Image: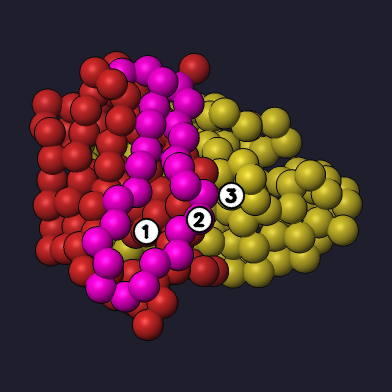
Amino acid sequence: KQEVTQIPAALSVPEGENLVLNCSFTDSAIYNLQWFRQDPGKGLTSLLLIQSSQREQTSGRLNASLDKSSGRSTLYIAASQPGDSATYLCAVRGDAGNMLTFGGGTRLMVKP
Amino acid sequence: NAGVTQTPKFQVLKTGQSMTLQCAQDMNHNSMYWYRQDPGMGLRLIYYSASEGTTDKGEVPNGYNVSRLNKREFSLRLESAAPSQTSVYFCASKGAATNEKLFFGSGTQLSVL
């Protein structure tokens, strides 16, 4: 059974800092990995999707990398802003059916 | 663009009551999902529908039933609510291609007393 872990569970940084969020998964047989953002009381918004054949994806100040062999992904946020404060979740899609397995998330706070 | 719409946003039930959570998407997506989110447990898949007319169990299906009414709508029913079903419920949808992103509704906060 696929297990997805995100460390740290919570992170507080000053505005302007570059930061890295980590995601690890136990089964490397994945189709893709997605990073989501969740604001309090809201649904999830997909930020980046990395296909299993890709090493990274970029969108604005966000860069996500994937190392399938080691079962790891990172989300890099450059020049963090208070508006980046949210919970970030990663999810992997395996080759069994149509299911995503989610990590527990990292709650990020960017202080002005 | 409405995207994925869930109703209701909030609901309080007494143990044993029944209710249906509604979900509709306007993106012509084939696949639809119901998740629950609990503190310390993350998001867990309850049921999904890969296409109109099909439904499959996810990780935590007990106590729930689903109906894929048409391509747009996917409802989740609690026949006899239990306090353990207190949670935030999210509906999501995805297009046909393997590597398409998942789109989520804004959630339903359900309390069972």
Task: Find the distance from the CA under tag 3 to the CA under tag 1.
Answer: 14 Å
On screen, A4 above or below A56? above
* Residue type highlighted by circle 1: Arg
How far across and how far down the image is residue A82, in percent?
35, 77
Q: Would you say the residues marked 2 and 1 are in contact, meaning their CB atoms lie under 8 Å apart?
A: no
Camera sees residue A53: yes
Q: Which residue is mark 3?
A: B37
Which residue shows up at 12% across the image and 26% down it? A53
Please provide the residue range marked out in magenta: A2-28
Q: Quadrant of residue A43?
A: bottom left
Which residue shows up at 65% across the image and 51% down it? B39
* Residue type highlighted by circle 2: Ala
In front of the other: A12 or B106: A12
Crowd class of label 2 (few under 14; some 14 to 19; many from 20; radius 10 Å): some
Q: Which residue is mark 2?
A: A10
In front of the other: B73 or A101: A101
